């Protein structure tokens, strides 16, 4: 537990700082929660809204959506007209700008630099985001004895840390999982684990990832046959133990965005390198829901 304390301290500190990264704006009578990508005489605001990336240009008190409407198969590129009008006081063309965050970022910084020689781009090198979720599932606990290969119910919670700027395909996850005793297997476990995820598919609405469990703190209860000697018939005793280990297990999963949250599905602990299994085929699935903090 002492080893995990610095991790929790760091996450809570970063979380308290990250709460100020977004701000609400009223645009055309509608309220949006937006992030500041570039701040200056011309400010770039953005966020993912209803599964789509949305961008807004702010100059003075005026905030204008940057859009690229498709009509009869052709894109109208309205955002270029908006940018050209807002930057008419500088010798700057918006013809080569595309509606992506890196392209818009470069254009806004260039305009602010041209109109203010003392301007410097103070964009943070990271943009930490946090997601919290809950899940339920089923497992056959292959990293325990489980002689009958019985299925057991699971439930738990996730806390995910994401850098949305430089490490978009990567995240760290703290997961608490409770495995419940079943009628066929008197084994239960409470586990807190640290996980790394690599998102090999990433879109505004759908992510697919490989999950690696790096380290875990586990407390479990089980029944075990106890004998005084080899000739003793023995008796069944319940034992309770805790351990800290580095299992290095791999699984896969996916997140699908719906409105303000995500439906999550994962196939956990398919393969373990740092822990022995009981030889059974792994069946460990979970289904849940998570949302941005």
Image (cartoon, rainbow, N blue to C red):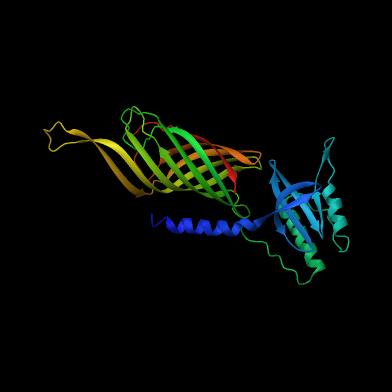
Image location of residue 124, percent across then percent down: 64, 61
Q: Residue 278 versus residue 193: which sits nearer the camera?
A: 193
Q: Residue at x 60, y 57 (%)?
A: 18
Asked whether, in this view, residue 290 is left or right of residue 235, the answer is right
Residue 284 makes an appearance in the image: no
Q: Position of residue 12 (x, y in %)?
A: 52, 57
- List x then y, in percent, for residue 288: 53, 37
Residue at 65 percent across and 57 percent down: it is 21
Residue shown at 53%/48% (left/top)?
160
Query: Image check: 266 left or right of 95?
Result: left
Q: Viewed as shown, does residue 124 lie left or right of 171?
A: right
- Measured along the vertical axis of the image, is residue 246 above or below residue 182? below
In the rendered view of the protein, which quadrant contains the N terminus? bottom left
Q: Is residue 37 visible?
A: yes
Image coords of residue 77 (percent x, y): 83, 46
Q: Looking at the image, which is closer to me, 28 or 64?
A: 28
Is 224 rendered above or below residue 175? above
């Amino acid at each position: 537990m002492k080893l995990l304390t610095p991790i929790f301290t760091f996450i809570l500190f970063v979380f308290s700082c990250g709460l100020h990264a977004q701000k609400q704006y009223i645009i055309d009578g509608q309220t949006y929660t937006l992030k500041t990508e570039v701040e200056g005489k011309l400010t770039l605001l953005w966020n993912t809204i209803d599964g789509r990336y949305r961008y807004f240009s702010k100059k003075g008190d005026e905030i204008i959506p940057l859009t690229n409407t498709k009509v009869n198969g052709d894109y109208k590129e309205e955002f270029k007209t908006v940018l050209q009008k807002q930057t008419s006081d500088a010798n700057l063309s918006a013809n080569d700008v595309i509606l992506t965050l890196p392209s818009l970022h470069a254009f806004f910084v260039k305009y602010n630099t041209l109109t203010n020689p003392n301007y410097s781009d103070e964009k943070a090198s990271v943009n930490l985001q946090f997601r919290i979720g809950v899940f339920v599932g089923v497992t056959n606990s292959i990293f325990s004895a489980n002689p009958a290969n019985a299925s057991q119910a699971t439930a738990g919670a996730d806390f995910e840390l994401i850098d949305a700027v430089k490490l978009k395909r990567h995240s760290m996850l703290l997961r608490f999982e409770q495995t419940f005793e079943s009628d066929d297997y008197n084994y239960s476990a409470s586990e807190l684990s640290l996980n790394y995820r690599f998102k090999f598919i990433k879109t505004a609405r759908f992510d697919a990832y490989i999950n690696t469990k790096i380290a875990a703190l586990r407390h479990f209860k089980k029944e075990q046959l106890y004998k005084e000697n080899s000739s003793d018939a023995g008796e069944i005793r319940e034992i309770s133990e805790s351990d800290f280990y580095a299992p290095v297990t791999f699984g896969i999963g996916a997140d699908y965005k719906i409105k303000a949250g995500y439906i999550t599905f994962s196939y956990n602990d398919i393969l373990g390198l740092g822990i022995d299994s009981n030889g059974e085929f792994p069946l460990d699935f979970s289904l849940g829901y998570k949302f941005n903090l």
